[in-house]
Amino acid sequence: MPVMPGRGKDMRMTGTRPADSGVQSVHRALDVLEALAAAGGTASLTDLAVACGLPVPTMHRLAATLAGRGYLRQAPDRRYSLGSRLVPLGTDAHALLGTRALPVLRGLAELTGESANLAVLTQGRAEYVAQAPGRHTMRTFTEVGNRVALHCTGVGKALLATLPPAHAARLIGTGPLEARTAATITEPAALHAEIARIRDRGHALDEGEMEVGVRCVAVGMPGSAPMAVSVSGPAARITDEAIAPIVTALTTAAARLAQDGPG
């Protein structure tokens, strides 16, 4: 399942679903939340109206209602952002997502022998929501709930590759990126080039960019809530020859997770 660019904020959200599917007002409210997420978490009322294909007065009523319930927050400059009411919902959803994904991750770990992980995009970082440990005594371990940088991890780069280029650019920024190891990509232009390569080939690699001696292969799953599944372990075991079968296993696991709807 290759990573693919997600939906940009200039796309009319109503064009992504059948016009007669479900309750229109619910669709519109969800469109607002998804448009804000696609815009990086903050947007003006006009931008939201354009993104959702709605008149500004209609968008104003929707935004005011969502803000009144705590799902949106309006800043002094009148721009809207995602509200705090979403935090506990996201926490519970992540816990359920991890529980449902575990059987798939365990199968992936058994097949590859290495630790398998599932991560989601949270506040500009990759958050691990589930892990199945590998069978080797020497293996990688990531604590569930841990959030890591996008630019130096396999799951992070896979997540960036699922996003619209403009959204990925906002998350990457324009300044030098933190160097975790000598292999870390620290220049935004170089990272953009790497993300383009990931989109083309369908998988991301962490070549010891987060921790020396650790290699990670990851595949992203695009959607309104991007996810990435990965296999990580010592570089001595995840050799160049091992990458192709790992990518095949990851692609199968990603397809199953998407089909089963773990979230």
Image: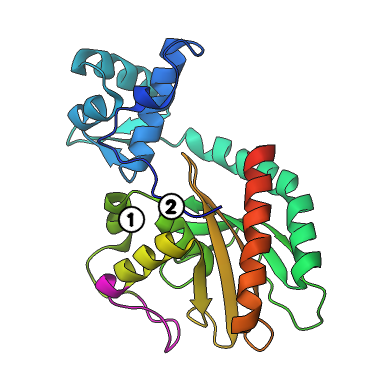
- The residue lying at 28 percent from left, 55 percent from top is 170
Residue beneath disc 2: 162
Q: Toward which corner of the image does residue 76 lie, by quadrant?
A: top left
Vertical side of 65 occupied by 45: above or below: below
Q: Toward which corner of the image does residue 179 lie, by quadrant?
A: bottom left
Q: Nearer the viewer, residue 143 or 121?
A: 121
Q: Is residue 260 shown left or right of residue 79? A: right
Q: Distance from label 1 to label 2 (Cα)? A: 9 Å
Query: Does residue 31 show up?
Result: yes
Q: Which residues are magenta?
A: 178-190
Of callouts 1 and 2, which one flags the residue occurring earlier in the amino acid sequence? 2
The picture places residue 207, in percent across and down from the top left corner, at 51, 81
Q: Nearer the viewer, residue 2 or 209?
A: 2
The picture places residue 87, in percent across and down from the top left corner, at 51, 40
- The residue lying at 68 percent from left, 54 percent from top is 253
Looking at the rendered image, the quarter that the C terminus falls into is top right
Vertical side of 230 occupied by 252: above or below: above
